[in-house]
Amino acid sequence: MLKITGLSSGYGGLAVLKDISLYIQEGEFAAIVGPNGAGKTTLFKTISGTVPTMHGQIEFNGQDLLAVPPAKRAHLGIAHIPEGRQVFPTLTILENLEMGAYTQAGQESWKDNIEKIFSWFPVLAERQKSQAGALSGGQQQMLAIARGLASAPKLLLFDEPSMGLAPTIADEIFERIITIHREMGLTVLLVEQRVADALHYADRGYVLESGQIVLEGSPDELKSNDRVRRAYLGM
C-alpha cells in the first residue's frame, strides 16, 4: 500500500531524512520507533506533503504520491493524526468530526462512520455539543483520532498518540487504536514513544535514528536486538 524508496526531505534545504526506504502492506500495522529528533514527525509530514521532498519516491496504492498536491492526499485515503492533537478548540466535537469528513469518502460514509466513532469513543457522543477546547487531554486525543476516522481513510498515520498523557489514559488510547485496526482492517503506521507497546502489537517495525532507518524487522527480531533492548526497552 505504501512504499517509500530513497527518500530525503527536510527544511530550508537541510535534509532531516536521509535516503530512507520502507513499505507497508494493506491491512498491516507498522511501527516506527526512535529517539526525539530522529525525523519521525518529518516523515509523516513528508507523506502528507507539508514538508518538501528533496529526492526519492513515495507510492500509495501504486500511485506516485509526490505528483499529488498536499491538499488532495487526504482524498486518496491518507489520514494524518498529528502529535499534540491539534483539535479545533472553539468548535464543538461534532463540528470537529464534520471537518474531518470533508473527503468524498467521508461524506459518502458519514452516517456509518459517525455511528462507529461514537461506539468506540462514547464520551464524544455524550459531549458532542461541547467545545473541543473544554475536553481533557485524553479526550482531545480521542477526538483527533475520531476526526481522522471521519475521513474514511485507508491509511492511518499516528504520530505519538500517547504523548503528554497519563499512563492509564495512554493505555486506553492504545487499546482503542488496536481495536479500530482489528475491526476495520485499516492499514496503520504508528510513531510511538512507548516502544514495548508499539512493537508488541505491530506486524513490522523500523528504528529511525538521525534521519536514517538503522534497523527493521518483525517485532520479535527487534525486541531481541541488543541495540533496541538497551536503547529503547531498558534492558
Image: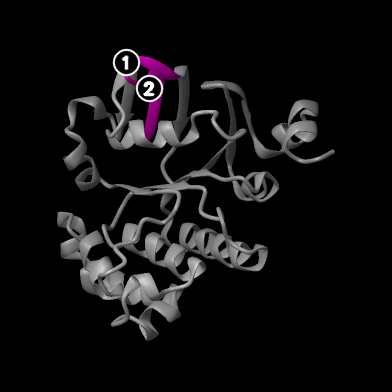
Mark 1 lies on a secondary structure that is strand
Q: Name the amino acid, label 2.
A: Gly
As helix, strand or loop, the secondary structure at mark 2 comes to: strand
- Position of residue 4 relative to residue 233, above or below, is above
Marked residue nearer the N-terminal end (2 or 1):
2
- In percent of width and height, residue 86 lies at 36, 56
Is any atom of residue 7 visible in this view? no
Give the image location of residue 40, x and y in percent.
Answer: 49, 34
- Which quadrant of the figure has residue 226? top right
At 45% across and 37% down in the image, what residue appears? 41
- Observer-side mark, 2 or 1, equals 2
Tell whether 12 sits left or right of 71. right
Q: Read off the magenta span.
A: 1-16
Image point (35%, 23%), residue name: 11
Q: Is residue 129 left or right of residue 206?
A: left
Asked if the stretch drawn in magenta spans residue 11, the answer is yes
State the count of labels. Answer: 2
Reply above or below: 81 against 169. above
Q: Which residue is mark 2?
A: 10
Q: Is residue 164 magenta?
A: no
Looking at this view, is 85 or 121 the one in front? Answer: 85
Residue drawn at point x = 28 percent, y = 34 percent: 50
* Lateral position of residue 109 relative to residue 16, left or right: left
- Whether residue 23 is visible here, answered yes or no, is yes
Instruction: Return the residue at label 1.
Output: 54
Whether label 2 touches label 1, CB < 8 Å: yes
Quadrant in which the N terminus appears = top left
Residue 178 percent coordinates (x, y): 54, 59
Whole-angstrom CA distance, mark 2 to mark 1, is 7 Å
Badge 2, how many Cα within 10 Å: few under 14, some, many 20+?
many
Which quadrant would the C terminus be assigned to in this image?
A: top right
